[in-house]
Image: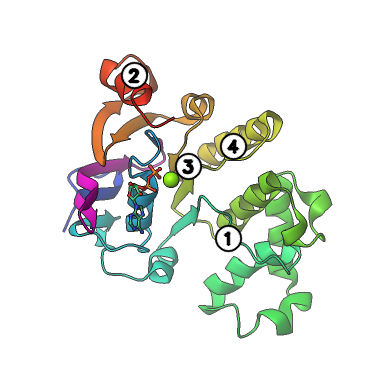
Amino acid sequence: MTTEKDNIVLHVADVHKTFGGLHALSDIDLQIEEGKTHAIIGPNGAGKSTLLNVVVGRLAPTRGAVVFDGQVLTGKQPHEINQVGVARVFQTPEIFPDLTVIQNVMAPAFARRDGSFTLNFFKSIDDETEIREEAEHMLEDVGMTASKDMLAGSLSRGDKRRMELAMCLIQHPRLLLLDEPTAGMSRHDTNTTIDLLKKIKERGMTKVIIEHDMHVVFSLADKISVLAGGRIIAEGTPEEVRNNPKVQEAYLGGAH
Ligand code: ADP
Ligand code: MG
């Protein structure tokens, strides 16, 4: 299977997902361009997280396929999808609370190198200079150098998210998926995260960002797809989407 355009890195092709009688996703066709930041917005319950979970292999679509860089991902396990260059930050932070911040950031680098981090991780973590140095660099990028020896479980929600971002960056993914990366953050932390995501963009990494906060979306997105009731109801540049009456209606009619 090939994608229509050369610059399409991710193609979600005619995806449906039902949960019992509920149509969480219907007729989803989404093309993500290389190097771009593509935002997916929509009211609560629109299907945004379901879509992301289908892309990363946590949920199997009822119909349709996900194609990444010409390769069909549908049917692959989450860790296999991760190995081909797709990294993600989930809505609820997934971290190792009893490890330090720097150990958390080192863990995915071990997993990437060895296929699994459990075998060698605890044995060799103290003498892995190269991975440690890279992890320190990533923590510097996300502004968390001062917290590197803290236990991850003791971090604020905002700091956990930033640490997760560092855990993604150390994998050097081609595609980064973010589910509400600024949820629960103060305005100050949100702005720091926006700056960080802009910096990542300059490096050419493709991003799909699910976001509730319009300030974040309009600061970052090249293109926006609007999801409501499991369907894409609008798509375009931030300007086009902002002025689309269907979008305004979906938000006003949304469950808020
Ligand atoms: P969003 O992230 O846009 O808020 P979700 O993708 O979480 O929306 O949910 C879309 C719809 O699918 C909601 O009605 C939700 O209740 C339902 N849903 C999500 N996950 C499941 C599941 N595992 N089982 C049953 N229903 C689900
Ligand atoms: Mg969600």
At x 36% / y 29%, what residue is drawn?
254
At x 67% / y 48%, what residue is drawn?
157
Specify the amino acid type for callout 3.
Answer: Gly
Q: Quick one: SS at disc 1?
A: loop
Q: Are marks 1 and 2 in contact (CB under 8 Å)?
A: no
Residue underneath mark 2? 248
Closer to viewer: mark 1 or mark 4: 1
Where's residue 250, x and y in %? Answer: 31, 25
Magenta-drawn stretch contains 49: no
Label 3 – label 2 distance at C-alpha: 31 Å
Disc sitting over residue 241 in the figure: none
Q: Are marks 1 and 4 in contact (CB under 8 Å)?
A: no
Check the image and report above or below for 240 versus 201.
above
Closer to viewer: mark 3 or mark 2: 2
Q: Are marks 4 and 2 in contact (CB under 8 Å)?
A: no
Q: Quick one: SS at disc 4?
A: helix
Residue underneath mark 4? 199
Q: Tell me which colouring the rendered structure shows.
A: rainbow
Closer to viewer: mark 4 or mark 2: 2
Check the image and report above or below for 194 versus 173.
above
At x 47% / y 46%, what residue is drawn?
179
Label 4 – label 2 distance at C-alpha: 30 Å
Mark sitting earlier along the chain (1/2): 1
For label 1, the crowd category at 10 Å Cα-Cα, with few meaning under 14, some 14 to 19 and many 20 or more, is few
Specify the amino acid type for callout 1.
Answer: Glu
Where's residue 30, x and y in %? Answer: 26, 42
Label 4 – label 3 distance at C-alpha: 9 Å
Residue underneath mark 3? 204
Residue underneath mark 1? 94
The quadrant in which residue 74 appears is bottom left
Across the whole image, how many numbered discs are drawn on residues? 4
